[in-house]
Amino acid sequence: MVSAIVVFSKLEDAKNIRAVLQRGGYPVTAICTSGAQALSYADQLGEGLIICGYRMSDMVYSELKEALPPDFEMILIASKQVLSDYSDGRVISLSVPLKVNDLLNTVGMIHSDFIRKRKKKKQHRERTEEEKKILKEAKELLMERNHMTEAEAHRYLQKCSMDSGNSLVETAQMIFSLNKFLG
């Protein structure tokens, strides 16, 4: 689950946002009134979500965003006027008065994105010798049957893999299955 840090110049505002998040099932690691406090927690976590107002006791949101570790997202909660004057594309913004569903849906979207990124990092691993053999044989089959170069066969496997949402090895195995079926 994505770790959230709530940062507002008024402690009461931070507590209210924390309560909304916790009722929605999202954990809050810390509530802070200064950017420095938030950065200290962020450095410990390494990744997560900052939910903040435009101005903290020691800095504004853009200074905090610049100092955050790269694997942190930020939700800025401010008035429509502030958002139109100062918001940039690197920060997700929500205007006040804040709707609880807007906040929870936005946090849910960010949470899903973190899960997807983690899965992608885990999937990136070295192929086994068996997997390398399957890929090589699939490329050889494509080269022989379709008169492709090795690079063309590899690109074909990659494209089919991306289009189907399967791994490269699964795609290669499907090519073998189709070859047996078609004879």
Image (tube, helix red, strand yellow):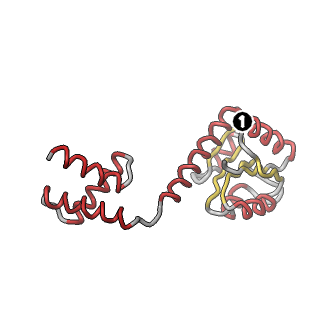
Q: Is residue 35 left or right of residue 49?
A: right
Res. 60 image quadrant: bottom right
Q: Is residue 88 left or right of residue 150?
A: right
Q: Total marks drawn?
A: 1
Asked if residue 3 is positioned above or below residue 40 in the image, the reply reads above
Who is closer to the viewer here, 117 or 176? 176
Q: Position of residue 93 (x, y in %)?
A: 64, 44
Of residues 88 and 85, the one drawn nearer to the viewer in this rendering = 88
Q: Nearer the viewer, residue 106 or 161?
A: 161
Q: Quadrant of residue 14?
A: top right
- Categorize mark 1 by other alpha carbons within 10 Å: few (<14), some (14-19), many (20+): some
Q: Residue at x 20, y 62 (%)?
A: 140
Q: Name which residue type carries label 1.
A: Gly
Residue 8 percent coordinates (x, y): 80, 49
Which quadrant of the figure has residue 58?
A: bottom right
From the top left corner, tell me how far across and down residue 85 is, in percent. 65, 48
Residue lying at 37% horizontally and 67% vertically, measured from the top left: 129
Q: Kindly identify which residue carries mark 1.
A: 24
Q: Is residue 49 left or right of residue 29?
A: left
Residue at 35% over, 52% down: 170
- Residue 145, how many percent across, how many down? 13, 56
Q: Secondary structure at mark 1?
A: loop
Relative vertical location of residue 26 with respect to residue 59 in this rendering, above or below: above
